[in-house]
Image (cartoon, rainbow, N blue to C red):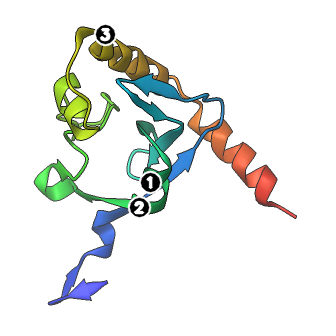
Amino acid sequence: MKFFNYDFEKYFHPVWWTNYKFRGRWIGDRFFPLIGICGYTRRAFTVGDFWSFFFIRDLIVMEDKNRCEEEKRCLNKDCPLNKTSISSFLKSKRIPYSKEDAEKVKRLIIFLKKYPVNEAFLKRDETHQH
């Protein structure tokens, strides 16, 4: 996509949603049945609900400006663009801060770091081949 001779396409990265090997998580009074996988890092970066699945299809990453639109909501702590705190993540999900929910987010970060993204994609590809 070019606009004023500027190539915006390089900034758009897909988001894939899956529930492979994930039974969902309760944080606060909200249930998140899906894991979001970042098209920029190819790593699990967030959890979402079915609204997320339908509305969050890509994200904008401007590497040259060291910016990402999910930088304050991303749970991939290995991403160099990540600026997320536990409180900013909870706020982005409209969950009031509590020590209990902060602990849940810390455990979720550990889970997402170990999430088998490649295995999830292989399983997805197997089920979509006919």
Residue 51 got which mark? 1
Which quarter of the rendering shows the C terminus? Answer: bottom right
Q: Quadrant of residue 89?
A: top left
Closest to the observer, 119 or 96? 96
Q: Is residue 73 above or below residue 68?
A: above
> Looking at numbered disc 3 in the image, what kind of residue is underneath it?
Glu
Residue shown at 30%/28% (left/top)?
77
Packing grade of label 2 (10 A; few <14, some 14-19, many >=20) is few
In-image side of 122 versus 101 (left or right): right
Residue 13 point in image, percent of width and height: 38, 60
Task: Give, as a three-letter code, the residue at label 1.
Answer: Trp
Q: Which residue occupies the foreground of this view, 119 or 21?
A: 21
- Sequence order check: which comes first, mark 1 or mark 3? 1
Q: Is residue 86 left or right of residue 46?
A: left
Q: Percent from the top left, x then y, of residue 37?
A: 47, 45
Image quadrant where residue 58 sits: bottom left
The image position of residue 21, as x and y in percent, is 65, 29
- Decide: marks 2, 1 in contact (CB < 8 A)? yes
Does residue 123 appear anywhere in the picture?
A: yes
Of discs 2 and 1, which sits in the foreground?
Answer: 1
Q: Quadrant of residue 7?
A: bottom left
Q: Which residue is mark 2?
A: 55
Residue 121 lies left or right of residue 127; in this view the side is left
Pick the quarter of the image with the N terminus: bottom left
Q: Residue at x 26, y 86 (%)?
A: 2
Q: Which residue is mark 3?
A: 100
Image position of 2 with respect to 107: above or below = below
Going from the N terminus, do you reach mark 3 or mark 2 first?
2
Is any part of residue 73 visible from this angle?
A: no
> Hey, which residue is sitting farthest left in the picture?
65
Q: Secondary structure at mark 1?
A: helix
Alpha carbon separation for disc pair 1 and 3 = 25 Å
